[in-house]
Structures are given as C-alpha cells and as structure tokens.
Image (cartoon, rainbow, N blue to C red):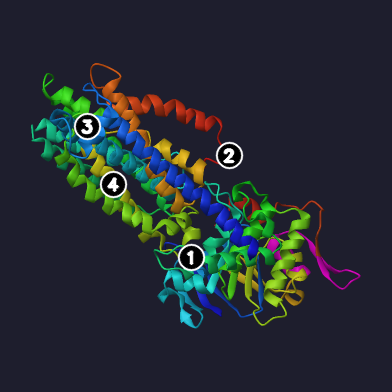
C-alpha cells in the first residue's frame, strides 16, 4: 500500500534523515519509535505528502506520491494529528464529517450518506453520544477518539497517527491502543494498515507491531518488536540503561533504570521540540 | 438511523425559521428606514411611493434619496460581514476583520490620492477599488516569496506591513492636501459615509459583491475544513493554497467594492460574524447567510441613526466604532477559551 525507499527527508537543503525505508500493507501495524528530535514528525509529514522528499521514492497505492493530487492522497491515507483545539466550536460530528471531504466535489456539501458514515465511525469507537457535543470542550481522550473516527470516516486503507496516546490518561491510552489493534486486525477483510509514532516501546510490544527505531536520522532497528527492541538497542538509542523483561503472561515490558546516569540523555535535552 | 433523521430535521427547522425571521425583520427595517427622515412619510405614503403612485414629491424622496441609501447600507453591511466571516475562518482567528490584509488601507490610499488629484467621484471610487485590490495583491505576492512554513501567519504579518506603508502614504497626502477643500473631504471619506450615495454609485458595486459572494457560498464546506489549519486541510484532501487564494480574492473583491462606495467602515465585519456564530454555530454554510442578513440589518440601523440623530451627518465609521468597540469587549468578557 505504502512503500518508501532510500528516502531523504528534511527542510530546504538540510537533511534530517537519510536512507529511510519502510513498507506497510493491509493489517500491518508499524510503530515508529525514537528520541525527541530524531525526525519522526518530519518523516510523517513526508509520508503524508505534506513535505516533499529530498530524494528517494514513495509509492502510494502503486503510484508515485509526488504525482498524486491532494484528493487522491487523502483517499488512500488518513492522518490523525495529536488532539488539538480548533478556534471555533464545531460539533464533534462536524469534525468527523470533515473526513469525507476527499470524497466530495470542490463545491459540494456532505450529504445523508456522508452523515451516516460519520455516525457509523463514531458508533464503532463507542463515542456516538458525543456527536452533538462541542468538540473544543471535549477531554483530550475524547478528542483523540473523534479524530480517529474522522480517519475511519475517510475510509482509507492506511492511517497515520502522530503519537495517538500522548496526553491521554492511563485508561484512555489502553482504550485507544485496543481500537488501533481492532482497526488493523478486525476479523472482517477490511484490515487497515496503521503507522503510529509513540514514545513508549511497551506499546509496540502490546500491539505486537513491527517496530521502526529511528536514531540520528537513520533507522536503527526494523523488524517485529519482540525481536528488534532489545536491551542493548534501546539503551543505546535513549541513552539510559533499559532492560526488557517478560511478564508472567508472556508479554514484554520495557523497564528503564532509574539509576542516575552519568550524563543526561543526549537527544531529549539537546533539541527543543519536534522537528 | 432513525435517531439521526429526527436530529437532522430538528436542526433544519429552526434554521429555516431563523432565516425567515431575519429576512422578514430586514424587510421591516428597510421599510422603516425609507419612512424616516427630515421629510417624514407615513407608512401609506411610503407604500404608495414604492409602488409608483401617490404624491410626486414623496416619490422623488423615496426613489432618489432614501431607497439608494437604504440599498447601499444593506449591501455594505452584508458585504463587510461576509468578508469578515470568511477571513475569520481562513485565518482561524475570531479577532480578524476584513481589513486584515490591508484592503482598507489600500482603498483609503487610493481614494485619498483621487481626492488629492481632484478627480471626479466615479474616478475616486475606481481609484479606491484599485487601491484595495492592489494592496492585497502585493501582500499575497510578497507573502508567497517569503519562505516560511506558516503561510497564514506570514500573510497576516505582511498585511500589517503593507497596511502601515499605505497608511504612511495616506498621511503624507493629507499633509500635502489643501486644508480647506481637500482635507475635510479626505477626513470624511476615511471615516466612512453613505451621505452622498446615488443609485448610479451602487449599480457598479452590486455585480462585484455578487461575484465575490458566489465563490464563498460554493466553497462553504472547504472553508470549514481550512479553519482546521493548512496541514490538516491538506491531509483531508483540500488544496489549501489554491482554496485560500480563491477565498482571499473573493473576500477582497467584496470589501474593496463597498469600501470604494462607503469609505472605511470598521468593526462591522469583526463583530457581526460573532453574533451569527452564537446563533447558528461555526459551520460556514449557515454562518455565511446568517452573517449577511444580520450585517445588512445592522448597518442599515447604524446608517439611519447616522443621518437622523443630529443636524449634521455623523460619519458611519464613528458610529460603528462607538457601538462595536464596547460590544466587542462584552464578547471577550463572556468569551470562550481558546482565542488562539
């Protein structure tokens, strides 16, 4: 569905990452990990076609991304940004309806079928009762679910989520992760490909995902989470001692050591925000 | 599904009632405004004159003096509010007014240059229109040359810069103008007024305003999506740059046309969309018609006050500021969070 090869990403002439490659098909969950400032957000913007790649190829639905219109891209990839507050008090249903835009003519308004699709997407995530609530007054977790519902209403084979569990409480994190798992691996044939970024390696284990570990603009590890996310790699990339352990139920968890490190972790303090 | 249908009807019916009520109220306001004035008319006389019957003098007052002015007030109010609502959605900021990109400053400079050169009225209006369009044209051109990822912020900042430059040029012309003849005309124009309006002035502005309103009405859904910001709008399938340019051209066309007609009338395009948003919510499909109707009625009331509360005409811009500013503070005080 989405395939990127030998990708160089960045702004202007300054490359933030080089030699990046990935591919996602139906039912795949790809978990992108890496310290702050390693280029995750830039990679996402490039994969969504919002930022031109400096070099390399991105094939979306078998066609080069650079030759597709915004509408074509939006029918293949949906984007779930981090929960935000828009300046105007739209109803949650309106926000979900905006996912239908790529299926409408330039001058058209969403119709009955679009409303039905939007409602169905909300019901599926269990937030049907939020339809007529003011989106800007919902909690962070509710907003994140509304944005995921919007991606569902967009009916794309692929969904890209930027830190979908950031700013969510413990319970909501688990709820959102369960929904992501269901999206990709639902019993019916419509399994979608999901790419998500996260700061928590445990989520890659929990989702049994394929993990991509980015470090200094390169892919440091790429493969099934339980194979590639090892003590050694995580310790090196995050700059703190990490030990991966297996719980009684056979699930893996990742335990950072709280022993005071000799020096602060390199990346997380050096860089101000996401680039 | 059944629940969805009832909810939809439940939404639509009050919307129709509201629009119908606003149209009816507007018609009554307009009729009242035609009656009111130094040459007082009874409702019967007014109705007869409107139908082309009755007293000859009443007919002249109604058709040559009152009606052009009432129509002008309706058009100017509707136009400024439509442009304001569009810019607020586009720039994702409820504090934005139609002159955010320098259209008023440019139109002001154009008109002042026309007065300074002692051009005829029609040429002054044309010069104001060209000035307004040119200012926004320069702003979008310069903004497209600046490399910055935040397109809207760049536009707004360049708008401030070009507006300041046009303001400086206007001040220079005021210093150089004839203080007895030209300066009062300049000052009066910059404060906005419909005192000298004739039917011939309105006719060329009407198609321009319509030409601007049509694309705004057609793009109503895309304008909603744009108000989520560029990045998200593009990810949802909207060519954000192209759509934004189209909205800017349409809103500027509207604003420049009526500013050429009425001078600089502030606050209307800033305040009225808020009231409309309180009534029907932020969805542009309903916000636009509601804004237009309320804006038209509001400016008609203000203009009728402007010509009746004192012996001399009170400039429109002064009244809209005196009414608009405190109202705006009230809006802010009762306001919601998130005026980002």
- Is residue A93 toward the left or the right of residue A207 in the image? left
Disc sitting over residue B254 in the figure:
4
Element class at badge 4: helix
Q: Is residue A66 above or below residue B222?
A: below
Residue ID for mark 1: A101
Chain letter of the residue beneath label 1 in the structure image? A
Residue ID for mark 3: B66
For the N terminus of chain A, the quadrant is bottom right
Residue interval drawn in magenta: A230-253
Q: Are marks 2 and 1 in contact (CB under 8 Å)?
A: no
Toward the viewer: B78 or A81? B78
Chain letter of the residue beneath label 2 in the structure image? B
- The 10 Å Cα crowd at callout 4, few under 14, some 14 to 19, many 20 or more, is many
Disc sitting over residue A219 in the figure:
none
Q: Position of residue A151 (x, y in %)?
A: 59, 66
Q: Are marks 1 and 4 in contact (CB under 8 Å)?
A: no
Q: Nearer the viewer, mark 2 or mark 3?
A: 3
Toward the viewer: B248 or A121? A121
Q: Are marks 1 and 4 on the same chain?
A: no
Q: Name which quarter of the figure residue B100 lies in.
A: top left
Element class at badge 1: helix
Report how far apart the C-alphas of labels 2 and 1 lie in the structure: 28 Å
């Amino acid at each position: 569905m989405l395939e990127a090869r030998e990708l160089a990403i960045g702004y202007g002439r300054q490359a933030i990452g080089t030699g990046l490659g990935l591919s996602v098909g139906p039912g795949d969950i790809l978990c992108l990990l890496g310290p702050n400032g390693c280029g995750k957000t830039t990679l996402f913007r490039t994969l969504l076609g919002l930022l031109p790649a400096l070099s390399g190829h991105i094939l979306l639905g078998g066609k080069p991304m650079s030759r597709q219109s915004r509408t074509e891209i939006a029918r293949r990839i949906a984007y779930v940004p981090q929960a935000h507050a828009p300046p105007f008090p739209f109803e949650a249903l309106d926000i979900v309806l905006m996912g239908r835009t790529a299926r409408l003519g330039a001058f058209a308004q969403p119709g009955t079928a679009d409303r039905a699709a939007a409602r169905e997407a909300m019901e599926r995530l269990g937030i049907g009762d939020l339809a007529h609530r003011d989106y800007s007054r919902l909690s962070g977790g509710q907003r994140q679910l509304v944005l995921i519902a919007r991606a569902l209403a967009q009916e794309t084979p692929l969904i890209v989520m930027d830190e979908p569990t950031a700013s969510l409480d413990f319970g909501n994190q688990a709820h959102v992760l369960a929904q992501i798992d269901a999206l990709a691996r639902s019993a019916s044939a419509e399994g979608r490909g999901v790419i998500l970024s996260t700061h928590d390696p445990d989520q890659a284990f929990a989702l049994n995902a394929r993990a991509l570990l980015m470090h200094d603009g390169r892919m440091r590890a790429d493969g099934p989470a339980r194979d590639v996310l090892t003590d050694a790699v995580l310790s090196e990339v995050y700059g703190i001692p990490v030990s991966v352990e297996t719980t009684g139920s056979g699930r893996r968890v990742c335990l950072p050591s709280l022993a005071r490190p000799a020096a602060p972790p390199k990346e997380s303090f050096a860089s101000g925000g996401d680039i | 599904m059944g629940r969805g249908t009832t909810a939809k009807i439940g939404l639509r019916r009050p919307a129709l009632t509201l629009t119908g009520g606003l149209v009816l109220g507007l018609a009554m306001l307009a009729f009242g405004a035609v009656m009111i004035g130094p040459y007082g008319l009874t409702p019967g006389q007014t109705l007869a004159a409107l139908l082309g019957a009755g007293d000859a003098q009443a007919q002249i007052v109604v058709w040559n003096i009152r009606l052009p002015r009432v129509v002008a007030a309706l058009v100017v109010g509707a136009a400024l509010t439509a442009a304001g609502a569009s810019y607020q959605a586009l720039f994702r900021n409820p504090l934005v007014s139609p002159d955010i990109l320098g259209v008023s400053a440019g139109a002001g400079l154009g008109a002042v240059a026309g007065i300074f050169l002692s051009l005829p009225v029609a040429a002054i209006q044309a010069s104001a229109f060209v000035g307004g369009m040119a200012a926004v044209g320069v702003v979008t051109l310069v903004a497209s040359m600046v490399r910055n990822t935040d397109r809207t912020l760049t536009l707004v900042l360049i708008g401030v810069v070009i507006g300041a430059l046009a303001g400086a040029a206007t001040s220079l012309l005021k210093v150089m103008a004839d203080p007895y003849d030209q300066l009062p005309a300049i000052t009066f124009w910059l404060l906005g007024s419909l005192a000298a309006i004739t039917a011939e002035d309105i006719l060329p502005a009407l198609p321009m305003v319509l030409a601007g309103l049509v694309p705004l009405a057609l793009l109503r859904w895309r304008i909603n999506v744009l108000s989520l910001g560029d990045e998200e709008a593009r990810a949802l399938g909207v060519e954000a740059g192209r759509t934004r340019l189209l909205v800017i051209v349409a809103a500027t066309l509207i604003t420049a046309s009526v500013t050429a007609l009425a001078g600089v009338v502030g606050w209307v395009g800033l305040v009225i969309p808020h009231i409309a948003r309180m009534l029907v919510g932020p969805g542009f499909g309903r916000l636009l018609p509601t804004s237009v109707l309320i804006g038209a009625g509001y400016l008609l009331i203000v203009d009728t006050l402007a010509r009746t509360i004192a012996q001399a005409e009170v400039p429109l811009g002064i009244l809209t500021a005196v009414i608009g500013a405190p109202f705006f503070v009230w809006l802010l005080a009762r306001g919601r969070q998130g005026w980002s």
